[in-house]
Image (spheres, rainbow, N blue to C red):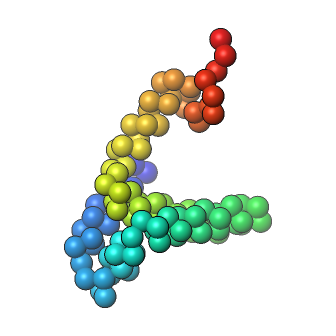
Amino acid sequence: MTDDLIRLYAAILDRQQMDPAHSKTARLIAAGPKKIAKKVGEEAVEVALDAMNEDRQGVINESADLLYNLSVLWATLNIHPDDVFSEIRRREALYGIAEKLPKTAPER
């Protein structure tokens, strides 16, 4: 999966230089981070709705859309997927692979 996401990110970077009239990705990037963030939110909601309906194929399809839009947002904000992967590894070292950072520091 990591290789797939890196390839997707590289393709997005290539399209940054394209004419927005000829590339959906270039058009989305030209719209700016607020528009891209809105698309990320919309796709996340669609994933959640399909999951609630136990629509497996819908979750797969919308997850692909979500990863695409998230990757476009990263590219726009100069965030490389490796930056995100590094944060995942950092959290894993602190809290375990399946854990998210707590809202407050754990009590000892």
Q: Residue at x 47, y 71 (%)?
A: 35
Camera-side residue of 7 and 74: 74
* Residue 4 visible from this viewpoint: no
- Looking at the figure, which quarter contains the C terminus? top right
Residue 54 sits above or below residue 95 on the image? below
Q: Residue furthest bottom?
A: 21
Q: Residue furthest right?
A: 53
Task: Give the number of callouts.
Answer: 0
Residue 101 sits above or below residue 5 on the image? above
**Residue 16 located left or right of residue 40:** left
**Residue 52 located left or right of residue 73:** right
Quarter occupied by residue 13:
bottom left
Q: Residue at x 41, y 41 (%)?
A: 85
* Residue 52 visible from this viewpoint: yes
The percent coordinates of residue 83 (x first, y second) are 36, 43
The percent coordinates of residue 80 (x first, y second) are 33, 50
The percent coordinates of residue 99 (x first, y second) are 60, 33
Q: Residue at x 25, y 83 (%)?
A: 19
Quarter occupied by residue 77:
bottom left
Q: Residue furthest top?
A: 108
The percent coordinates of residue 4 (x first, y second) are 38, 56
Q: Residue at x 64, y 21 (%)?
A: 106
